[in-house]
Image: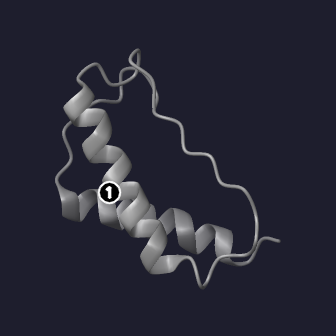
Amino acid sequence: MGKRAIRRAVDRNRLKRAIRESFRKEQYRLPSMDIVIQAMQGRDDKKNAAELDDVLAQLWKGLEGDA
């Protein structure tokens, strides 16, 4: 998560914590692989925690079958 995509450190750290927590909940379902999540510039619309969890759950579900 770079400064270009998410300017404020507090926002970057909040996003990182949310991603880590979501991963911890779902890691037993995921195949053994490296996962990189990259923030995109201009996509800084403030999503609440529930929306972010839903988006991440969809991403994790998409990875379940891959290996």
- In the displayed structure, 67 sits above or below 35; it is below
Instruction: Kindly indicate the quadrant of the structure image that contains residue 55.
Output: bottom left
Residue situated furthest top in the rendering: 4
Q: Which residue is mark 1?
A: 18
For this view, does 15 lie left or right of residue 26?
left
Q: Mark 1 packing: few (<14 Cα in 10 Å), some, or many (20+)?
A: some
Residue situated furthest bottom in the rendering: 28
What residue appears at the point 38 percent right and 18 percent down from the top-left corner? 3
Look at label 1 and name its amino acid.
Ala
What residue appears at the point 66 percent right and 68 percent down from the top-left corner? 63
Of residues 48 and 36, the one nearer the viewer is 36
Q: Which quadrant is the N terminus positioned in?
A: top left
Q: Which quadrant is the C terminus positioned in?
A: bottom right
- In the displayed structure, 46 sits above or below 18; it is above
- Disc 1 is placed on an element classified as helix
User: Residue 7 placed where, x, y %?
Assistant: 28, 19
For this view, does 59 lie left or right of residue 19?
right
User: Residue 24 placed where, x, y %?
Assistant: 46, 73
Residue situated furthest right in the rendering: 67
User: Residue 58 placed where, x, y %?
Assistant: 48, 67
- In the displayed structure, 19 sits above or below 67; it is above
What residue appears at the point 48 percent right and 67 percent down from the top-left corner? 23
Instruction: Kindly indicate the quadrant of the structure image that contains residue 27.
Output: bottom right
User: Residue 12 placed where, x, y %?
Assistant: 31, 35
What residue appears at the point 78 percent right and 71 percent down from the top-left corner? 66
